[in-house]
Image: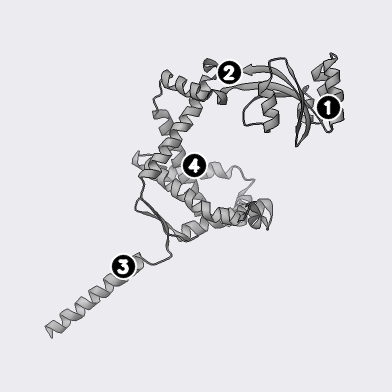
Amino acid sequence: MKNKKLVILLLIMVLIIAIAGCVKEKPGTEAAIVNGEVITVQEYEETLEVYKSMYKNQYGDTALETEIEPGVTLLQYLQENILENMIFERIIYQEALKNNLTVNDTELDELMIEYKTFFEDEQAYADFLTSNNMKEEFLKNSLRTDEVIQRYVDFYMESLEISDEELLQYYEDNVDKFVSVKARHILVSSMEEAEDVLSQINAGAEFSDLAMTFSIDTNSAINGGDLGYFYKGQMVPAFEEAAFSLEIGEVSGIIPSDFGFHIIKLDDRSEGFEDKKELVLSEYKNVKYSEKMDELENQSEIERKLKL
């Protein structure tokens, strides 16, 4: 009898352990595991639904079927990238906690109060949650995560020690990124108009006056065609190539683009390490932060469990 009871007891214990094991390893409940911490399928699906609702609200019901690149719809892009973003956020969040960077409940309440100031009243806030398929708890968790990550970014940036020699080397290695030009342009819709305007410039007419009279770029025309300062990568390639090749005071030929036909005058060029030092420092800090993120990701143990 005693042996019988012992066998039954052992069977019960085995059954309990087996059930516990099944619960722990139940398929479909884990989207990813990041350094031992689980991102659940429920968390992933809730985040996906919020983003789907946001895009549909902004761009219409068919937005998710739109191809953002050949063979890839917006929905497919979201499905693939949201989990990666969640994994990346979790890595940074974990690193922030290691450095005692947290947001307590009182601070979270203050963040919620500040967030709600963007809405006219409580009803508008409630409508926002409903229309975006979002629970308030989801919003709170998002605000907490965003704030903790921002605190880590600030903490890391402030901890960087960068010498002038190091900064100067970065500038010299990337000098083209830090040259800006100040230009004005005249934009017309046909080659004939452009040739006529250019002939007037060559005859001595004031560039600014012609821009105000003929340019179809109304935003700059009102200021004599002034575009202000800009860096490489901010304008269409043909326009940029022409603008950066000019000497100060020089006027270009006719530059065709998808917008029409441009005539460009260069007003100024800004370059040099001392003039650009603050910009160089900001850019270099961003580079160092990106390197730190790569390092954290490479050091992390990541299991992607969800089949997308």
In the image: residue 167, left or right of residue 300: right
**Frontmost residue, 23 versus 183:** 183
Q: How far apart, in angstroms, are the residues tagged by discs 3 and 1?
A: 76 Å
Q: Which mark is residue 147?
A: none
Label 3 CA crowd tier, 10 Å (few <14, some 14–19, many 20+): few
Question: Under tag 1, what secondary structure?
Answer: helix
Front position in the image: 223 or 209: 209
Q: Residue 99: horizontal and vertical position, in percent? A: 35, 38
Q: Is residue 152 above or below residue 173?
A: below
Q: Rounded to the nearest whole Å, what is the CA distance between mark 2 and mark 3?
A: 64 Å
**Residue tagged 3:** 21
Q: Write down the residue under mark 1.
A: 194
In the image, residue 124 sits, relative to residue 215, either above or below, namely: below
Kindly identify the amino acid type of the residue bearing the numbered disc 2.
Glu
Q: Position of residue 199 (x, y in %)?
A: 85, 20
User: In the drawing, what numbered circle is on residue 271?
Assistant: 2
